[in-house]
Amino acid sequence: MGTKQFGFGDSEQSTAKKRTRRERFLAEMEAVVPWKALVDLIEPHYPRTSSKGGRPPYPLET
């Protein structure tokens, strides 16, 4: 008689994946770092794709 019926929220809680250290770190970095300002600062000095060929540079945000 003392059993509790589980609802959808309880199901979500029991199957929820625990956040890893990496996920917590990246979420904190996303909140702290002003990415747009950083990209704007680096962009004038970042290499552009050359018409001579060769390997293209990584995307700036990477």
Image (cartoon, grey):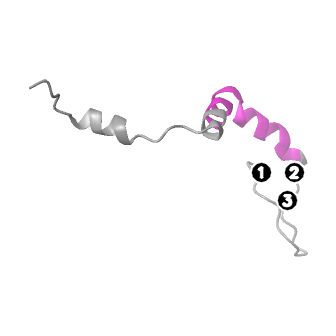
Residue type at the position of mark 1: Leu
Numbered disc in front, either 3 or 1: 1
- Residues drawn in magenta: 26-44
Q: Earlier in the sequence, mark 3 or mark 1?
A: 3
Q: Which mark is residue 46?
A: 2
Instruction: Please determine whether, in this image, residue 3 is positioned above or below residue 17.
Output: above
Magenta stretch encompasses residue 32: yes
Q: Earlier in the sequence, mark 2 or mark 1?
A: 2
Circle 3 crowding by C-alpha within 10 Å: few under 14, some 14–19, many from 20: few
Circle 1 crowding by C-alpha within 10 Å: few under 14, some 14–19, many from 20: few
Q: Which mark is residue 60?
A: 1
Q: Residue at x 61, y 33 (%)?
A: 24
Q: Is residue 21 left or right of residue 3?
A: right
Q: Which residue, as the protein is rendered here, is positioned at the far bottom? A: 53
Q: Quadrant of residue 53?
A: bottom right
Disc 2 to disc 3: CB gap under 8 Å: yes
Disc 2 to disc 1: CB gap under 8 Å: yes
Circle 2 crowding by C-alpha within 10 Å: few under 14, some 14–19, many from 20: few
Q: Tell me the residue that label 3 is attached to.
A: 48
Disc 3 to disc 1: CB gap under 8 Å: no
Disc 2 to disc 1, C-alpha distance: 7 Å
Q: Is residue 18 left or right of residue 59?
A: left
Residue 16 x/y as whole percent: 41, 40
